[in-house]
């Protein structure tokens, strides 16, 4: 089984946290983000991935059942969410980054708020 773990570059803080991977309920060693390969027996395997974080303590929880046939390498991809309160995406590649819509919406709202504050400040200073 080959697992590739990824995070979006704009969420660079995740570089400081290693994803935690559990295979059939047992934590398995991970080096860091990227591709890792483990030898597993044929059959159904439960895979769980999350990222330990500050607040909340775990982000991007995701689970999948992976069927493995004899002699087969199954590719699985995990993508951490763009919003810390969302689950991660785990399954056959390619996966999409979860919560992209809410993140883009919040960024747009923030930009509109800042522009509104600047315009209001300009109006107040010119009328005085």
Image (cartoon, rainbow, N blue to C red):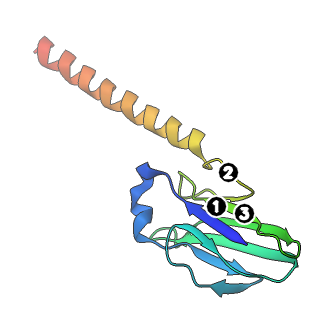
Question: Is 31 placed left or right of 75 in the picture?
Answer: left
Looking at marks 1 and 2 on the same chain, the residue that comes earlier in the sequence is marked by 1
C-alpha distance separating marks 3 and 1: 10 Å
Q: Position of residue 100 (x, y in %)?
A: 57, 43
Residue that extends furthest to the front in the rendered view of this protein: 71
Q: Are marks 1 and 2 in contact (CB under 8 Å)?
A: yes
Question: Is 5 placed left or right of 41 in the picture?
Answer: left
As drawn, the label of residue 95 is: 2
Task: Work out whether 74 lies above or below 21.
Answer: above
Q: Helix, strand, or loop for circle 1?
A: strand
Looking at marks 3 and 2 on the same chain, the residue that comes earlier in the sequence is marked by 3
- Residue placed under numbered mark 1 in the picture: 78
At x 61%, y 64%, the residue is 4
Task: Work out whether 95 lies above or below 87.
Answer: above
> Which is nearer the eye, 61 or 118?
61
Q: Position of residue 7 (x, y in %)?
A: 51, 57
- Residue placed under numbered mark 3 in the picture: 75
At x 37%, y 31%, the residue is 111
C-alpha distance separating marks 3 and 2: 12 Å
> Which is nearer the eye, 116 or 50?
50
């Amino acid at each position: 089984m080959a697992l590739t773990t990824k995070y979006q570059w704009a969420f660079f803080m995740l570089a400081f946290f290693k994803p935690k991977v559990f295979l059939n309920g047992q934590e398995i060693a991970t080096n860091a983000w990227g591709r890792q390969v483990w030898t597993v027996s044929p059959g159904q395997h439960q895979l769980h991935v999350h990222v330990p974080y500050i607040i909340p303590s775990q982000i991007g929880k995701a689970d999948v059942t992976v069927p493995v046939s004899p002699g087969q390498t199954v590719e699985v991809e995990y993508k951490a969410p763009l919003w810390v309160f969302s689950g991660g995406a785990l399954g056959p590649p390619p996966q999409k980054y979860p919560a992209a819509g809410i993140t883009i919406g919040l960024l747009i709202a923030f930009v509109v708020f800042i522009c509104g504050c600047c315009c209001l400040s300009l109006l107040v200073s010119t009328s005085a």
